[in-house]
Image (cartoon, grey):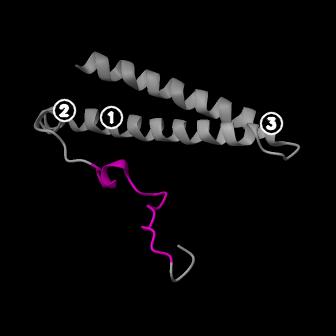
Amino acid sequence: MDRPDDTSKPRAGRNRNASDAPSSAPLSPDVSAETSSRTPQQQRIEAQRAQLLQAHGVLRCLYEVLLHAECEDAVFYAEAAYVAANLVNNSVEELESVRLNAA
């Protein structure tokens, strides 16, 4: 989006909430009914879980890119991204158990 002739869509800022993200497909009646029956706390947990899953995906991609980079220190950075991805994944798993226990 740096160039005046760039027609790509603007990207969301990093402070944007998961609930603000546009949906690619409308929610089915079952999904929206399930969401409305949840408490606000359960909805916040699910929103945070979704954000953590996205962060995990980004970190895994970063890991793969850094593994194949030609920089001397790239392998060390890849390992750091891998550790961070695992920490995020562990948090997602903990939130999964909270979600399952709440149901």
Residue at coordinates 47% horizontally, 40% vertically from top-left? 54
Query: Disc 3 marks which residue?
Result: 75
Mark 2 and mark 1 in contact (Cβ < 8 Å)?
yes
Residue placed furthest toward the bottom: 4
Residue at coordinates 50% horizontally, 81% vertically from top-left? 5
Q: Nearer the viewer, mark 3 or mark 2?
A: 3
Query: Disc 1 marks which residue?
Result: 46
Question: Local crowd at mark 1 within 10 Å, few (<14), some, or many (≥20)?
Answer: many
Question: Local crowd at mark 2 within 10 Å, few (<14), some, or many (≥20)?
Answer: some
Q: In which quadrant of the rendered view does residue 16 lie?
A: bottom left
Give how far apart the Cα atoms at labels 1 and 2 are: 10 Å
Number of numbered markers? 3
Residue range in magenta is: 6-24
Ranked by sequence position, the earlier of labels 1 and 2 is: 2
Q: In the image, what residue type sits under mark 1?
A: Glu
Give how far apart the Cα atoms at labels 3 and 1 are: 33 Å
Q: Is residue 49 left or right of residue 32?
A: right
Prevailing secondary structure class for the magenta stretch in the rendered image: loop
Question: What x and y, as percent, mark residue 3?
Answer: 56, 79
Tell me the element at label 2: loop
Q: In the image, what residue type sits under mark 2?
A: Arg
Residue at coordinates 52% horizontally, 24% vertically from top-left? 90
Ranked by sequence position, the earlier of labels 3 and 2 is: 2
Mark 1 and mark 3 in contact (Cβ < 8 Å)?
no
Q: Is residue 19 left or right of residue 5?
A: left
Query: Disc 2 marks which residue?
Result: 38
